[in-house]
Amino acid sequence: MPRIQQKKKGIRSNWSENNMKSAIKLVLEQRVSERRAAKDCGIPRQTLRRYLAKARSGVQFTLKEKLGKKAVLTAEQEKELVHVLLDMERRFGKLLYHENGTQRIPPENIFNVDESGYTSVHKPGKIFARKGKKFEGALTSAEKGKTITVVCCISAVGQFVPPMFIFPRSVASPSGWINEELFEKWFDHFLKKVRPDACLDPVLLILDGHTSHTKNLSVVSKARENNVVLLSLPSHCTHKLHPLDAAVFKSINTFYDEEVSTWLTQHPGRIVTEKEIPELFKNAYGKGGTIKNAVSGFKKSGIFPFNPEIFTEEDFIASELNELPIVADVPHHSLAETSVPLDLGSRELNYQATEVEKSETVTASTTFHVDDIQKAPDVPIKNIYLIDHSTPEKLKYPSDYIIHYFINQ
């Protein structure tokens, strides 16, 4: 029978601060050996030797050190994190309404913030031209321009917070995009205009998951201090859940392109620069940023009035691609021949499955898409074609694998 070795149970970190003080006192004052003091006080000798070196050097130290890696968060930060997580768990699913069904956050306290970029090179709209004309030009500003970011904010009742412009500058934002520091400045502007600290009910601010929003600790702290609840939308859902994207920005962008086209017509030979963009945006903002569009954006996204059934199964069709099974790779130049039952009178139908590249062509006269023909069980088929080889001609096939059905007269 093999010997079973028992792991010796050590005394690591089983000593107390009083035992360490007593051991240090025995060695330094009573001249007791380190070995004897460690044994009497129940302390590992190497641990006692390390603390004695600190005591003899005069360095201040803590007697009971915590084992393991150093903590990233302090004890106060850990308690605050626990409080936030418990609060989020308590309010999950009950953000807008209380348990009794009454509304927790009124519509005038629900806001949505988002950014949109506006360039000096706009996209010309559609124009009328003679039928059959191959080319028709349209006037635009330049080939390459600068982009200015505009931060907009609306409420569920149609209140608009004055927008903030972000120009490309080397110090604040070289690219002209939003960052943590600039979003914090906008949030201070939001607190000044909305005054959520003076509201009895909390103010809900809906935003996307950009790093300048979600990884901005100073903004999160200011939101807690000023009665603001931050709600970040899931990824790849902002086109449906963002009220600004759903109704407001589309109208503003359309009117902005019209304003740029009008300005270029009235100023021939000149181009739009970043100096003209704020004025052009102001005119478009006045036309597209209406109370009706703001209220419609919240209604279309189902936020207010709250409508969890606003999205149908068709809105989730794109996600079904992730649920399709993975098809095993088919070896190249695979060939399969067999007969398929089909009522063709006295004619016989055979098929041949052959690999065809997208760039290649296949000779055939007439191609029919047939849905009622049985597919080959061992070959992944994307399209089925019925081919009669009486008068050949070249046809392109977009599929990777196609079936040639040969009708034997």
Image (cartoon, helix red, strand yellow):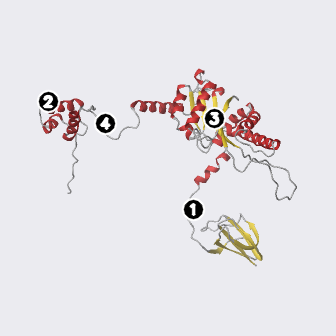
**Alpha carbon distance from label 4 to label 1:** 53 Å
Which residue has dot 2 on it?
A: 29
Looking at the image, which is closer to me, 257 or 409? 257
Which label lies toward us, 4 or 1? 4
Dot 1 lies on which element?
loop
- Under mark 4, the amino acid is Lys
Marks 3 and 1, the one that precedes in the sequence:
3
> Is residue 235 rendered to the left or right of residue 272?
left
Q: Residue at x 18, y 40 (%)?
A: 45
On residue 66, the disc is 4
Q: CA distance from mark 1 to mark 2?
A: 79 Å
Q: Are marks 2 and 3 in contact (CB under 8 Å)?
A: no
Q: Residue furthest front?
A: 269
Q: Are marks 4 and 1 in contact (CB under 8 Å)?
A: no
* Sequence-first tag of 1 and 2: 2
> Residue 113: which disc?
3
